[in-house]
Image: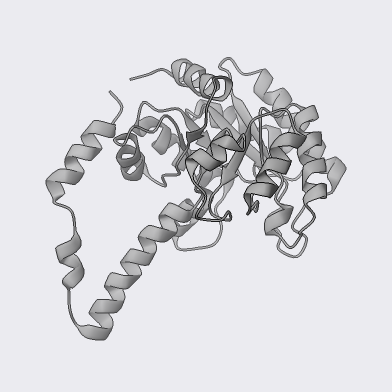
Amino acid sequence: MRTLAEKAAAFRALHDEPGTFIIPNPWDAGTARLLASFGFKALATTSLGLANIHGRGYVSADEIIENARTIAAATDLPTNGDLENCGADEPDDAARLIPRASEAGLAGGSIEDFTGDRANPIYGFNLAVERVHAAAESAKKLPVPFVLTARAEQLIHGSSDLDATIRRLQAFEQAGADVLYAPGLKTLDQIRTVVASVGKPINVVMTHADPSLTLDQLAEAGVKRISIGGSGSRFALNAFIGAAREMAERGTFTFVGENPPWSQLLEAFAKGAAS
């Protein structure tokens, strides 16, 4: 099995070398191994996918870390952690989650400016920047390199002000973030504008973007990383809901005939497992 140092080096190289890569989001060891079996070069956890496992709309920082530990150990791929707001409001408190994330086996992780409070969803500008700076300083002190992603969340929490989002991303870049991420970018023009406005790699999540966009188009626009957030989990649950509805409303079980052979899943799990 690859060491964390080897995973971290591979993850950093993905950001430094030319090209664009897809970083899909498993929510447990099984989905991590299935994704690894398809040849992806890195994985990213999803707090929404984890919340779905628990049947609720939120997760704690401790739950995020333990889920990340399970996913990171499941394959030889470097894993990025969706750390939400790092479990705290104050910069120094939030920064304490970064070494915990590294200890759990993550090669990188994110800090976002969504507070977790729907009534007051976004941290003020100065506090948001201070939080990223504290997280970046914490990452620099780690014995193994850690790719820090800073997320500006306004576009999915009621704002349509792209300029304000760009201002935050630029400030996060200056504060020490390695990767920048603004969920809610929808069009190729918006994405090109953001890419041209900063000097660090950009992550685009397809959960909110035009679903007709392709890897080639996003690469041409200058995107470095493409993720899907909780969309994989939601897609899987939608299929499960369809099966439940068929049983409840029709009393039939035709979905069983669409299942892959168990042996096929076992082969994929084995192929994607850490060596």
Q: Is residue 194 visible?
A: yes
Residue at (78%, 60%) from the top-left corner? 120
Residue at 76%, 59% (x, y): give it.
160
Q: Nearer the viewer, residue 249 or 140?
A: 249
Q: Position of residue 176 (x, y in %)?
A: 74, 26
Q: 192 left or right of 4?
A: right
Task: Give residue 159's quadrant in the image.
Answer: bottom right
Rendered location of residue 206, percent (x, y): 53, 50
247 is higher (above) or lower (below) than 190? below
Give the image quarter of residue 6. top left
User: Could you tell me which residue is drawn at 81 percent across and 35 percent down?
Assistant: 171
Vertical arrangement, residue 17 with respect to residue 200, above or below: above
Q: In the depicted view, which residue is nearer to us: 260 or 193?
A: 193
Query: At 41% across and 17% down in the image, what residue appears?
Result: 3
Res 123 seen here: no
Q: How does the figure colour the protein chain or chains?
A: one colour
